[in-house]
Image: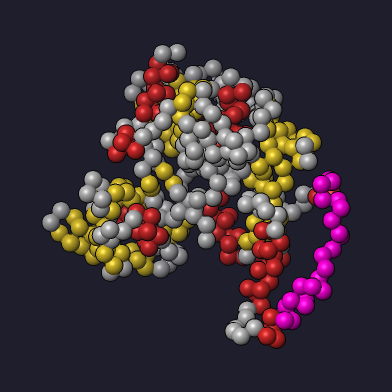
Amino acid sequence: MSFRLLKNKNFKIVAILLAFIVIFVFGYKIGNGSFDLRWNSMNSSLPSTLNYSLIQQEYSILKNNYDGKLNANSLEDGILSGLANATGDVHTNYYNAAQAQQFTNELNNTFSGIGAELDNNSADQIVIVSTLAGTPASKAGLLTGDIVNSINGKSTQGESLESAVNAIHGPSGSTVTLGIIRGSNNVIVKIVRADIVVPSVNYKILPNNIGYMNIISFANDTPSLAQQAAADFKQHNVKGIILDLRGNPGGLVSSAVSVCSLWLPEGMTIMTERHNNQVVQSYQSLGGNILNGIPTVVLINGGSASASEITAGALRDNHAATLIGVKSYGKGSVQQIFNLSGGKEIKVTIAHWFTPDNINIDKIGITPDIIVPLTQSDQQKGIDTQENAAINYILSH
């Protein structure tokens, strides 16, 4: 199972979904396997088929000699996974049916958990920061400030936040038992985990009439939610906008294009894709740029990857935004999903993308216009120096 670490705007560790999914491999062009690989001249010298006799020979050796129990499905998964791993590309992966379903859920911010945000307090205890409305955690009556002192009967004393989150996480329909300290009371709470869908966009209007939009990933719901936020900003005639992409691992290219189009007039280049160093596709803004001309700051950090970097690069190169924060992750490749039989999938790196200024940021990242670090000391004090810098920049321009 792969995990992603979600972060809130103050960069404390967050377990909204009680699932960690640290895969900075978003930025996908989702497809059904119709992508034509015949253009790949780099691999034209490969044989048209593999030497299956060797695979059969190895299988026979294992079947007849292995001192243990073998599983046919696991062996098949091993072969398919080995082919993908042999590319040497961490973003080209094979998924069995269960992994494929989980991957789809993750891409759409659908997770199995209890719907609580966790953090450490000043005494290094694990506490409930908040619960999502309508989720198992909320229905069970968990409150902000509750101390989680045991999980399934095991004390959390000395346990890391990540370990606690992993212990609470589990499949939908299963039960987790939490020991809660609430004031002077000790409470035992049994919670049935469920599938939880988290909106990919949150927004608000800050003091001084500055719009703040946080996109946690570029999912299917991102275009409509970002459009709602933009309309509200426009209605309130905001002085400026902060687009917070910190900790955002990416997502769908189409969603990134839609977000950029809120600022960019129709026909502006957002990014181009190259395969074997040849341009194979170019993405332009769609129009409907209701935020065009409004001073905008995009916040990025080392957790901003792929579609986040596409968005940040497009808005900066097209002079629609200023970037503040620290260097982004640096994922400049594009993946496509190909369906296999039995619900299995393979995700393949099909191209690399370039910003409008013809820059590929793969393994390099994007350096912001204004570098503002966020120290651990600031985080512990609840001070967001990067957001404060964005506010000051907007107010001074």
Q: Residue furthest top?
A: 397
Q: Which residue occupies 59% across, 84% down?
A: 68
Q: Which residue occupies 39% across, 23% down?
A: 389
Q: Magenta span: helix, strand or loop, mainly? A: helix
Q: Which residue occupies 60% across, 39% down?
A: 363
Q: Quadrant of residue 63?
A: bottom right
Tally of numbered tags: 0
Start and end of the magenta stretch? 39-61
Q: Residue furthest left?
A: 184
Q: Is residue 330 magenta?
A: no
- Is residue 163 among what the camera can see? yes
Q: Position of residue 366 (x, y in %)?
A: 56, 31
Q: Position of residue 271 (x, y in %)?
A: 67, 32
Q: Position of residue 127 (x, y in %)?
A: 27, 52
| 213 or 313: nearer the viewer | 313
Q: Is residue 44 magenta?
A: yes
Picture layout, residue 164 above or below residue 220: below
Picture layout, residue 337 above or below residue 266: below
Horizontal side of 391 relative to 72 (left or right) equals left
> In the rendered view of the protein, which quadrant contains the C terminus?
top left
Horizontal side of 127 relative to 221 (left or right) equals left
Q: Which residue occupies 66% across, 29% down?
A: 359
Q: Position of residue 268 (x, y in %)?
A: 67, 24
